[in-house]
Amino acid sequence: MPILGILASSITGGLVTDAGAMFPIRSYVVPSTAASSVTFDLTGISGYTHLQLRVMARSNRSATADYIKLQFNSDTSSVYYDHVLIGDGSSASASTSQAYYGTSTVTQVRIPVVPGTTTTNASTFGVSVTDILDYTNTNKYKVVRSLGGYDDNGAGNINFFSGLWRSTNAITSLTLTPNNGGSGSTTFPQYSSFALYGVKA
């Protein structure tokens, strides 16, 4: 599992220091050995109000698609909520079932679907943008919202997800894992990429 330290450099003396400006913090591209999970360590980071996570990835799960699990501070307890809305061009689906959609008190927030190994196009990657709001605020629970999707030779889908980590702790790390990777056998294959940005306070 790669654990990624954060570049702590800051830029001063220019317009880029304006409040609300977005800065790249760290990025990671999975090598040929694949990755069972990816962790960003936020220790030492300051001056940002929100985080944005940009993902372009696949899963080697033997299925058409897989979710990505997002957990904070290595917390695997049942203190998360998440909600899912999926459209495939002809219909939309959403549900409150514990199995997949609108879940509550689960062990992770899920972010949008990425292709698995049985997609029509074996080189298809899913993309998503996830905002992690007020990540250092110790007076509120942490809110996550995501938009993403992929095309699979005219099929595929688009997803809108949201979630909540029911903790007032500041987020000091975040870990991404293939949703079907609980056994450790499912990984992110080569070229899956993850980039973390910060929004200036």
Image (cartoon, rainbow, N blue to C red):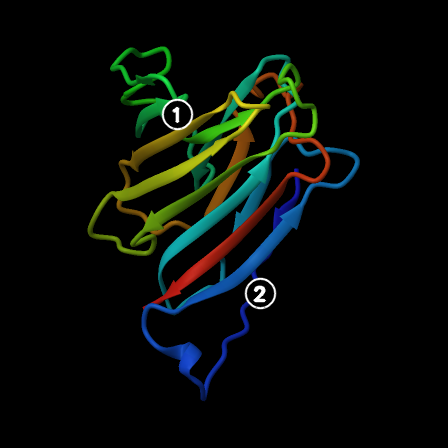
Q: Amino acid at mark 2?
A: Leu
Query: For this view, does 172 lie left or right of residue 28?
Result: left
The mark found on residue 107 in the picture is 1
Most distant residue in the left direction: 139
Residue 109 visible: no
Above or below, comparing residue 76 to residue 130 in the picture: above
Query: For this view, does 43 lie left or right of residue 125?
Result: left
Above or below, comparing residue 18 to residue 187 in the picture: below
What residue is disc 2 on?
7
In the rendered image, residue 11, in percent from the top left (x then y), is placed at: 49, 79
Q: Residue at x 64, y 21 (%)?
A: 186
Q: Are marks 1 and 2 in contact (CB under 8 Å)?
A: no
Residue 70, image quadrant: top left
Quarter in which the C terminus is drawn: bottom left
Residue 95, image quadrant: top left
Residue 11 visible: yes
In the rendered image, residue 60, in percent from the top left (x then y), is placed at: 66, 22
Mark 1–mark 2 distance (CA, rounded to whole Å): 29 Å
Front in this rendered view, residue 94 or 166: 94
Number of marks drawn: 2
